[in-house]
Amino acid sequence: AEEGRAPAAPTPAFDRDEEVERQRSAGAGARAPAGTNGRAGTNGRAWVGTTVADDFAGRAKWAEILTGWTICETRADGEIRWTRPGKRVEDGHSATTGHEGRDVFHVFSNEARPFAPNESYSKFQAYALLKHGGDESKAAAELYKAGYGTRQPPPPPTDDDRPEWHKDRAGFLDDAPPGPPMNGRHDPEANGRVATPEPEPGIVAALIEEAKTFRSELEVLSAEDFLSACARLDRKGLDRVAAVIKDRKLGPRAFRRAVAAGRPKRAGTAGADDHPYVEHGDGTYMTFVTKEGEIAERRIADFTARIVREVERHEAGERRFQFEIEATHRTGVVARATVDAEQYAKMGWVESLGSLFKVMEGRGDRGHLKLAIQFLSWQEADVPRETVYTSMGWIEHEGEWLYLHAGGALGAFGPSDAVRVEVPGPFARYTLPDSGEGPEEIRAAIAACFGILALAKADRPGAAAVAAILATLPWRAPLGPSDFTIHFGGGSGNYKTSAAKIACQHFAPGVDRNSKPPFTWESTAASLQRSAFDGADTVLLIDELTGERALEIGTAFIQAQGNLKGKDRSTSNMGSAAGLDPRGSPLSTGEVDLTRQSAQGRSLAVRFTQGMIDKAVLETLQDAADSGRYATAMAAYLRWLAGRIEDARRAHKKTVAGLAKTIRRETEGDAVHPRHPGIVAELGAAYSLFLEFAVEQGACDRATADAYAGTVRTYLMDLLREQGDIQRELGPGRRFLTLLRAGLGAKYYHLQAAHDDNAPTPYASECGWHKDWVYQGKDVGSVLEWKIPPNSKAIGFIDVPDGFIYLNRQMAMEVARAMGDRQGTPFENVAGLARDLADAKLIMTVKEGEKTRYEVQRRIRGTKDRFLALQLEQVFGPPEG
């Protein structure tokens, strides 16, 4: 629409009955005479009343329609100026209503999607665009259900209204006077009635388009108007519609039987309401007309059944339709079954009701029972349809963004019952409040979130990193899948799991201080992959990264998370299906570190040490979490996001790109993994969006928000630089030194002196020797001397004067393999140990032409051999004293 001009009225949905009447009138010649009350013969199609659009325009308020828009000015002449979502009120308005007395919404902004700039919209058009993507037919249907619109057909005519020729029960099917067949031929099944005129192509085309909208056989068979119109088609037209039904696998045979049921009946079947099925106390019956013209009944099952609900189920990345069926046996026993729609027609589900429920053995009885249940289910009222999701996170449902959690769905206006949520057991505690709290409660909840930063203490190194993660990760999670994992590592008793729960309780207040985390690394890889898919847009807390198996599963999981790609799956019929891609933000805890470089690059690690966490501050945060403060703030944040989620995601992505570029420039020359600046940028940008929400809610002013942003950025940058130290320590070269010292200290291995058989003092203990009593004769007795422990393996030599340790390469590899396994953290790539030690500059190398040798040649105790040469002080440090 042009600026200043009211928009055109919404285009009405196609009305098949009106089109049939129009086509018929065009070719049927003179109309039937009027009835005694002057009513024209229109079969009750003269509609009267107010349309949905007009009624909605008169009763709805703009503030109820414009989700996320803010009134920035109300003028004396009645004009209201509006600011679009994502724009501050003080920055000006983006649209108006009531300009010059016109009740239309006129948009100026280029950034007010889905509205176009310089266009005007009626209330109905705006509602249809925001809630149904511009589909005015869906919008009208939804509003009609909500009570808008009074346009209804008048009651059907009585016999007094009808012309004399119409009162004859053998009269014509339509409101037209007697006459010759309009298409020049008679329908042999019409029982002496004149066939209806052959419809023009427009009618058939309209019915074909309607057939393409059906999603199940039951939906086809319950569309009475559609079937009635098809019953008036000639064979050629019906074949064209049936071809569409067949292509979509919607029960073409049942469709044709239903159409035939709408035509005049011949001997053989009988029944009310266009189907031959009835119910009695002892079961379901089919009626039929005998050759003698009498109506008879035949029992086809000893129970009755109803489809009580249709379910559109979204599970494990797939959508399927189901019927919930309730059956009542003739003895009064009631049973229920949930059946996939594609399996319904096979009737195998009857066995799941129990052995008491029986279908008769007559020819076609199972097929008749299938139809009987469908017809009888829809006879009294429409079967309700329900949409069910078994995962969490954002969905777009009928034009509205909803966030799903274990307790239901949250939209821009609060809780929504548009869909039902059935999450797996481990997610049962991920239940958010309905965000019905007032502004003061929400501001108090946001203030509690700011309090997380109090965990950072100057006298507790590393605590700031914990505070940074807990303060930022929850606000990153709702913005989409994270291609990284956060890992809290360290020994037992350092509060790493207690701290991680603080982040989790933003979404799962039920994961309190006394309960176990919802997921563990002890689960199977397939189970964790499914949880990573179902836990969309939330913090996924996984505990107990301990032991070889858990580390192997955890490493594969973190690699998949980093790639946002799940492992392909096998189907029940030995086929293949796409993997369940991870969609959440994982937070891992455990006593072992992520040692593989592929996992280190896709994660940020926080090392917990004794005394790092202030217990008093932690308990304050736990009180806030257990009382639901963090979950209250998150629920309000999600409602705020629901009206702008697409714009928020685009803005976040743009902010991350710019921030990551800045961080890479600031850390140029530092030992920073190429992926880590992007991870830090993701967390920082998400926290900035949370602060924007906090300012809009009045929880803080802009200056305070900027101060919080600066503090968090400092903490994140410190954490980024710490990753280099952690990676160096966990690198294979440095890790080997740790394993070597552990193996010598446990006396599994030992080093010998390079020049004699004596103990290699002053490093004898460090080299795996121990003191033992040795008898020196009667005069001296027993004395303590350094000895090689029993069963200890020699792995090389120590040359104290030269300051080197010479290791046999094969024995060094055995140390790496065996000690890694003993610690529950297998050493990665044992075969590449020498290269890893050289890369870490821990061994002496020799250049021979173009080739670099990692072993040096030495003559020790008269034998010449090659060894890995490590500097003594890098292994043991300087000698004491």
Image (tube, rainbow, N blue to C red):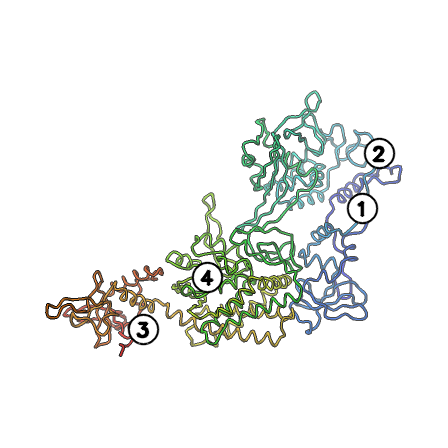
Q: What quarter of the picture does the N terminus occupy?
A: bottom right
Q: How many marks?
A: 4
**Considering depth in this image, is 676 or 118 the residue closer to the camera?**
676
| The quarter of the displayed image where residue 376 is located | top right
Q: Quadrant of residue 232?
A: top right
Disc 3 versus disc 2: distance between alpha carbons?
105 Å
Residue 546's spot in the image, x, y percent? 40, 59
Q: Which residue is mark 3?
A: 841
Does residue 291 appear anywhere in the picture? Answer: yes
**Vertical relation: 176 (above or below) 810:** above
Find the distance from the CA under tag 2 to the CA under tag 4: 78 Å
Question: Which element is circle 1 on?
Answer: loop
Q: Which residue is mark 4?
A: 588
Q: Are marks 3 and 1 in contact (CB under 8 Å)?
A: no
* Callout 1 amino acid: Trp
- The reply to whether callout 2 and callout 4 are in contact (CB within 8 Å) is no
Binning the other alpha carbons within 10 Å of mark 4 as few (below 14), some (14 to 19) or many (20 upward) gives many
**Residue identified by numbered label 2:** 159
* Residue under the image location 86 percent in, 40 percent down: 39
Earlier sequence position, callout 2 versus callout 1:
1
Q: Considering the image in quadrants, where does the C terminus appear?
A: bottom left
Query: At numbered mark 3, what does the secondary structure look like: helix, strand or loop?
Result: loop
Q: Amino acid at mark 4?
A: Ser
Q: Residue furthest top?
A: 292
Precedes in sequence: disc 3 or disc 4: 4
